[in-house]
Image: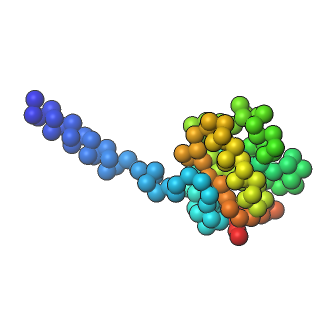
């Protein structure tokens, strides 16, 4: 019996040492500075990060982050079923104001915002690769 406990303990220890534990490295949900946003986007963009762009359709058509989901902030409540759940999400707009409104809308609608962030700064969409700055 003691040997099986030792084996289980060793297995758990090895699993914890070998498995990446990114959650401790991620910032708390909510607002991010441009530098934090750049780091988060770079780290999670290939790992299922949902980018929710809450600008107007016209703004989105002028340039956007590749793969972003466009739901204008004023339509978010009526289109909430289109917003994926259970995935990390970055909310962006042009200056951060609409993104903060969208974040609070998600909370008011009962969505978990544990892994949801929004940029408090500007985004430049012109190059095809987003640039976040203040």
Left or right relative to 40: residue 7: left
Q: Residue 42, image x and y in percent?
A: 60, 58
Seen from this angle, which residue lies furthest right?
58
Seen from this angle, which residue lies furthest front?
108
Q: Residue 101, image x and y in percent?
A: 72, 50
Residue placed most toward the observer, 109 or 55? 109
Q: Quadrant of the C terminus?
A: bottom right
Q: Residue 123, image x and y in percent?
A: 75, 62
Q: What residue appears at the point 85 percent right and 49 percent down from the top-left corner?
A: 56
Q: Quadrant of the N terminus?
A: top left
Q: Residue 129, image x and y in percent?
A: 73, 60
Residue 131 position (above or below residue 58): below
Tally of marks = 0
Seen from this angle, which residue lies furthest bottom?
134
Q: What residue appears at the point 57 percent right and 37 percent down from the top-left corner?
A: 86
Q: What residue appears at the point 25 percent right and 40 percent down from the top-left corner?
A: 11
Left or right relative to 90: residue 2: left
Residue 13 position (above or below residue 121): above
Display coloring: rainbow
Q: What residue appears at the point 41 percent right and 50 percent down from the top-left corner?
A: 20
Residue 4 position (above or below residue 21): above
Q: In this orientation, does residue 80 appear? A: yes
Residue placed most toward the observer, 83 or 108? 108
Quadrant assignment, res 132: bottom right
Q: In this orientation, does residue 42 appear? A: no
């Amino acid at each position: 019996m003691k040997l099986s406990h030792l084996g289980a303990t060793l297995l758990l220890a090895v699993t914890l040492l070998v498995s990446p534990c990114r959650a401790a490295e991620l910032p708390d949900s909510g607002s991010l500075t441009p530098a934090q946003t750049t780091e988060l986007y770079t780290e999670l963009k290939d790992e299922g990060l949902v980018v929710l762009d809450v600008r107007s359709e016209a703004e989105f058509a002028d340039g956007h982050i590749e793969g972003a989901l466009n739901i204008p902030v004023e339509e978010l409540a009526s289109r909430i079923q289109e917003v994926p759940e259970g995935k990390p999400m970055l909310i962006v707009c042009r200056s951060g104001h609409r993104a903060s409104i969208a974040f609070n809308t998600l909370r008011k609608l009962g969505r978990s915002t544990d892994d949801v962030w929004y940029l408090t700064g500007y985004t430049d969409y012109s190059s095809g690769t987003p640039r976040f700055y203040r």
